[in-house]
Image (cartoon, rainbow, N blue to C red):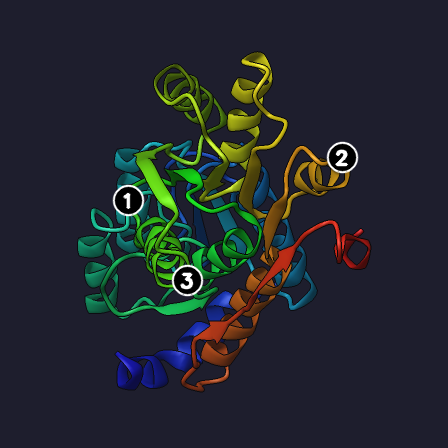
Amino acid sequence: MKKCLSILAGAFLAGALMTGCGGGGGSGSSSGKIAYINFDNADAFGGKLIREEIARGAEAKGMQIEFFDARGDSNLQIDQMRDAIDSGAKAIVLLAIDGDGIIPLVDRAEKAHIPVVTVNRDANGGKRYRSYSEEYEAGKLQAEFMAQRLPQGANVVYLEGTSNLGSSQQRWEGFRTEITARRPDINILDMQDGRYSKVEAMKTMSTWLSIFPKIDAVVCGNDQMAFGAIIALKAANRLQGCLVSGVDAVDEALDAVASGEMAQTIKQDGIAQANGVVTILEQIGRGETPQDILVPFTSITRENLAQFR
């Protein structure tokens, strides 16, 4: 693929790096443009923050991008990806819903000599460039925090993100592996797929609270699930003494850390990931072979919160 990209770089530079940004929302033509295929515009972090930062960066660099919203529907995202390939997109930026289901379309884009750049949520295979964070590290940071603060024999539940995404699996694996190694006395009572959803997390947390008389910590694959868990914990009058951890460090999570409702959030730097996408597109346009861009995670607690507000 890298050889093909070098050969096609001149065509990409001529057609993709043009003034202005498009604003599509559904399926449609992306001929001659970079297609940004988003998993859900309604999501505050991946859907909005990253998308808007990419739009700003692309406009500043004179790139023409057309934006598509899959609205959380993996079949719609597959259709949008297929349309972008068939209409001759110059490149595709992808924030995936289904890490496995999108792989055939990533392969199809490669055969059509269309470079694919994934951001935040990765496809689980296929030839693509990535602007990403090492997801295992997020779970590891959560495990380190909980290992230091939980009492002997503590009970923990884990809310995983959408379970067929590699990022979700790696965050869970990072937490499970590292907490077991550091604190084998800690009991992981259950792990359930919360689909990165506040509503789903609230439902699951309510069920756990009816089953388990003692829960010392709730570890979540993102902040939205942490918010759902907090709602359920408050309703059951069981938030006090329960440590809640999430991932993303959205503004609401920082507020929750400040108030004590959340003990920790892991900062995933969406702005840096978005800037990484723009950098990769620039490198492709210049005929260079980009390297993946790795953006580190950071643990935020009340101790260091002031650095991030």
* Label whose residue precedes the other's in the sequence (1 or 3): 1
> Residue under circle 1?
98
- Amino acid on which the number 3 mark rests in the picture: Arg
Tag 1 secondary structure: loop
Q: Which mark is residue 55?
A: none
The residue lying at 54 percent from left, 13 percent from top is: 236
Relative depth, front residue between 148 and 103? 148
Tag 2 secondary structure: helix
- Amino acid on which the number 1 mark rests in the picture: Asp
Q: Which mark is residue 259?
A: 2
The residue lying at 63 percent from left, 48 percent from top is: 249
Q: Are marks 2 and 3 in contact (CB under 8 Å)?
A: no
Q: Where is residue 211 drawn, in percent x and y?
A: 34, 18
The residue lying at 64 percent from left, 54 percent from top is: 53
Relative to 26, 251 lies left or right: right
- Amino acid on which the number 2 mark rests in the picture: Ser
User: How many labels were placed on the picture?
Assistant: 3
Badge 2: how crowded within 10 Å, few (<14), some, or many (20+)?
Answer: few
Relative to 209, 176 lies left or right: left
* Label whose residue precedes the other's in the sequence (1 or 2): 1
Q: Where is residue 114 drawn, in percent x and y?
A: 31, 66
